Amino acid sequence: MTLEEKLRSDFQEAQRAHNAFRAEVFRSVFAAIQNRSIENRSKGGGKTSLTDEEVLEIIAKEAKKRKEAAVLFREGSRTELAEKEEKELRELERYLPQPLSLEELHVVIHDVLQKFKGDATQNNFGKIMGEVMRSVKGRADASQVGTLLKEALEKERSDA
C-alpha cells in the first residue's frame, strides 16, 4: 500500500467516524498532492501518480506550514488558532518518518564531511549541505542541519 493509498484509507475512516477535523486535514493534503500532480503533468512528465517520497515531501511541507502558523498565532495572542494548527500538525506528523536525533545528525554530518575531506570548507557549504540533506531525506529540519554543519566546519577549521 502506497502512502497516498494509506492517506485515502485513513480519510475514508475519518469520514465514516464523522471526524470532520481529521477529514479536513486530509483534504488539505490531497489538495497539495493534486497540485503537485498537475505541476508534474504540465512539466511534460506525463505521470499523474506521485511516489511515496514525493507524498512525504508534501506532508512535511504542510506540517512546516502548520508549525510556522502556530508560532505566528501565539505571537499574536491567538491561542485558539495556534492550538488548532498544532493539532493539525500532530495529525500530519503521524505520517512523517521519525526525526533524527542530534547524535544521529552529528554522525551523518561527520560521514558527509569525511567524503569531502580536503574540500570541507565554508566555501563548499552549499555542496556539503546538499549532500547532508540528501542523506537525511526529510528527517531533519534544514535550519538545524545548517547550524550543526556550520559548527562542524568551524571545528574542522580550528582543528586544522
Image (cartoon, rainbow, N blue to C red):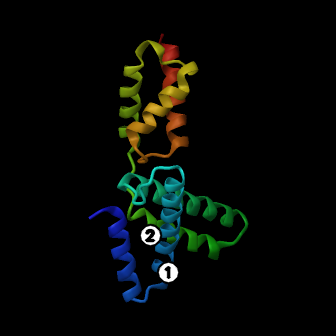
Find the residue positioned furthest to the right: 76
The answer to whether any part of residue 98 appears in the image is no
Quadrant hosting residue 76:
bottom right
Q: Residue furthest left?
A: 1
70 over 123 or under it: above or below: below
Alpha carbon separation for disc pair 1 and 2: 10 Å
From the top left corner, tell me how far across and down residue 143 is, in percent.
55, 42
- Disc 1 crowd rating (10 Å Cα; few below 14, some 14-19, many 20+) is some
Callout 2: helix, strand or loop?
helix
Q: Residue at x 44, y 85 (%)?
A: 19
Q: Examine the rendered structure and indicate whether residue 37 appears above or below residue 111.
A: below
Dot placed on the residue nearer the N-terminal end, 1 or 2: 1
Residue sitting at 54 percent across and 56 percent down?
39
The image quadrant that residue 13 belongs to is: bottom left
Q: Circle 2 sits on which residue? A: 91
**Secondary-structure class at tag 1:** helix
Residue shown at the point (50%, 81%) measured from the top left: 21
- Give the percent coordinates (x, y) of residue 81: 63, 74
Total of numbered circles in the picture?
2
Q: Which mark is residue 21?
A: 1
Q: Is residue 79 left or right of residue 27?
A: right
Q: Identify the image quadrant of the N terminus.
A: bottom left
For badge 1, the amino acid type reads: Phe
Q: Considering depth in this image, is 29 or 18 the residue closer to the camera?
A: 29
Q: Nearer the viewer, residue 126 or 142?
A: 126
Instruction: Tell me which residue sits at (44%, 69%) in the image.
Output: 91
In front here: 118 or 159? 118
Amino acid at dot 2: Glu
Q: From this viewpoint, is residue 146 visible?
A: yes
Q: Is residue 107 above or below residue 42?
A: above
Q: Return the residue nearer the eye: 114 or 158.
A: 114
Q: Position of residue 125 (x, y in %)?
A: 54, 25
